[in-house]
């Protein structure tokens, strides 16, 4: 059995109605693989239709921009040059005409203009730029290019280099959208204005942590990415990320990130970090209602290492080893209940005992070194120690375990899954901006802000799929 299919485009501008045949197919039905359009046939149909549709729209747009805005006279054409407009359904070849500017308007200006550059400044359709950005944020540039070529009629017009350039261009635009430089929510504001603020919607928690990836310039070294996740009591969580040292204004980024999430100056804010100096300084002076909390998970991790040394000591000097284990339990208990003074006393006493200990335990020196480091760690983070037990019983967060998962989701699965992957600081920083927005579902909103015409009924579905 044969089925003939003819696809026509009917154009009607209100004055002239034209009909053009786009494709003529004959389908022979012999098996399941013959039913409907094949991928190759659908690509050919979409590409042919897209070429005609875009040409008709561009010609109509040019017709309305052919006359001088001041005098109303028709502009003389100097010629045209070819351009390629990259769309989801094929690369459309167009002619961009150049028109002479009337002499009375050439003062300190160009002699010719190309109106089509106003309509197509980037030579790529926003929907295609969005898909390239979204997919390349989830998988490698090469894999994203292959995926686009597999399902869309774009053929050889896409490759890893092109996709990378487009994604980084989108990320740079996101960087340009950042608010002005500010180091706190109160900078440049009058506290009396707080009276006009609505009642905050509960505490917001933001966790920050770091991960390392290989440096492209010096392949024997790594550099640090700072990533985090902000979780409000009401609403959806959002990701944030940047390259430590490359971003010169990280506090501005955090403020802009929180503001977009609905945070306001009089709202309670809790930073939970591993206590590292880099991430700890980011939490300073962000908001008058903010606090920094040392992550309980990282405290217990360090105590667990110390316990392993103490258990090894038991096998050589039982009494001293058991005494060290008991003292570590007391330290942990004091820290859990927020008794910082007693905890530091116990830490100092245990360190003195270890320094005076005469034992053949082979790891005694490492035990002492780890104990000194723990002493410094607790001392430097003393203002960030809280009553963890009380906070835990009240149902509030005391651990940045959710940030550990964030590091894995944002960094490990895209930047460092393959050991041979290497990154420039700029490339990693810019990709972080698109990846974090892709993972939390806010990428579509950024594109709709730039291109309002992209708003449609399935915009919500895009966000849910990305989340």
Image (cartoon, rainbow, N blue to C red):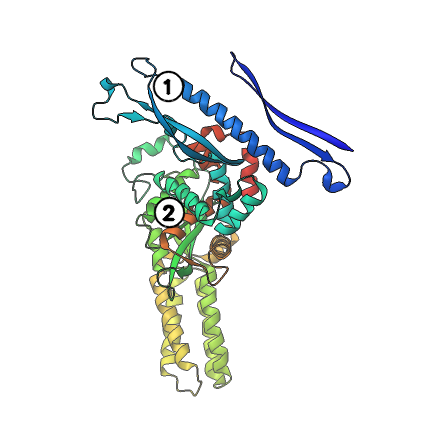
- Residue under the image location 40 percent in, 73 percent down: 370
In the picture, which quadrant includes the N terminus? top right
Label 1 crowding class (10 Å Cα cut-off): few <14, some 14-19, many 20+? Answer: some
How many numbered badges does the structure rendering display? 2
The residue that mark 2 highlights is 290
C-beta proximity under 8 Å, tags 1 and 2: no
Quarter occupied by residue 162: top left
Task: Pick out the residue farthest to the front.
Answer: 79
Residue 244 falls left or right of residue 153: left
431 lies above or below 61: below
Q: Quadrant of the C terminus?
A: top right
Q: Nearer the viewer, mark 1 or mark 2?
A: 1
Residue 152, percent across and down?
A: 56, 40
Along the line of sight, the residue nearer the viewer: 292 or 273: 273
195 vs 176, nearest the viewer: 176
**SS at circle 2:** strand
């Amino acid at each position: 059995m044969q089925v003939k299919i003819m696809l026509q485009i009917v154009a009607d501008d209100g004055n002239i109605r034209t009909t053009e045949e786009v494709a003529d197919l004959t389908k022979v039905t012999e098996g399941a693989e013959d039913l409907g359009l094949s991928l190759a046939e659908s690509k050919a149909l979409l590409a042919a239709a897209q070429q005609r549709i875009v040409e008709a729209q561009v010609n109509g747009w040019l017709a309305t921009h052919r006359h001088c805005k001041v005098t109303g006279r028709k502009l003389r054409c100097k010629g045209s040059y070819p351009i390629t407009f990259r769309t989801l359904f094929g690369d459309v070849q167009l002619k961009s005409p150049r028109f002479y500017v009337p002499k009375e308007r050439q003062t300190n200006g160009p002699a010719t203009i190309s109106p089509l550059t106003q309509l197509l400044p980037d030579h790529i359709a926003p929907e295609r730029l969005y898909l390239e950005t979204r997919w390349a944020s989830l998988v490698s540039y090469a894999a994203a290019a292959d995926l686009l070529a597999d399902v869309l009629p774009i053929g050889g017009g896409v490759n890893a280099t092109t996709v990378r350039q487009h994604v980084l261009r989108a990320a740079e635009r996101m960087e340009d959208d950042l608010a002005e430089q500010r180091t706190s929510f109160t900078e440049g504001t009058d506290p009396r204005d707080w009276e006009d603020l609505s009642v905050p919607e509960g505490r917001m928690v933001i966790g920050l942590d770091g991960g390392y990836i290989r440096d492209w310039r010096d392949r024997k070294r790594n550099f640090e990415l700072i990533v985090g996740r902000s979780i409000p009591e009401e609403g959806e969580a959002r990701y944030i990320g940047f390259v430590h040292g490359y971003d010169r204004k990280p506090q501005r980024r955090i403020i802009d990130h929180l503001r977009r999430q609905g945070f306001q100056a009089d709202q309670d804010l809790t930073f939970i970090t591993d206590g590292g100096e880099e991430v700890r300084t980011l939490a300073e002076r962000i908001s008058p209602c903010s606090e920094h909390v040392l992550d309980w998970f990282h405290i217990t991790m360090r105590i667990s290492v110390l316990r392993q040394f103490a258990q090894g000591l038991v096998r050589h000097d039982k009494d001293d080893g058991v005494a060290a284990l008991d003292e570590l339990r007391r330290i942990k208990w004091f820290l859990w209940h927020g008794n910082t003074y007693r905890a530091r006393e116990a830490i100092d006493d245990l360190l003195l005992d270890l320094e005076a200990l005469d034992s053949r335990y082979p790891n005694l020196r490492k035990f002492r070194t780890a104990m000194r480091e723990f002493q410094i760690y607790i001392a430097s983070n003393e203002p960030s120690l809280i009553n963890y037990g009380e906070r835990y019983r009240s149902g509030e967060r005391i651990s940045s375990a959710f940030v550990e998962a964030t590091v894995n989701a944002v960094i490990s699965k895209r930047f460092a899954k393959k050991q041979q992957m290497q990154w420039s600081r700029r490339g990693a920083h810019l990709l972080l901006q698109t990846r974090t927005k892709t993972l939390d579902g806010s990428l579509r909103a950024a594109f709709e802000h730039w291109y309002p015409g992209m708003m449609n009924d399935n915009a919500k579905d895009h966000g849910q799929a990305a989340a």
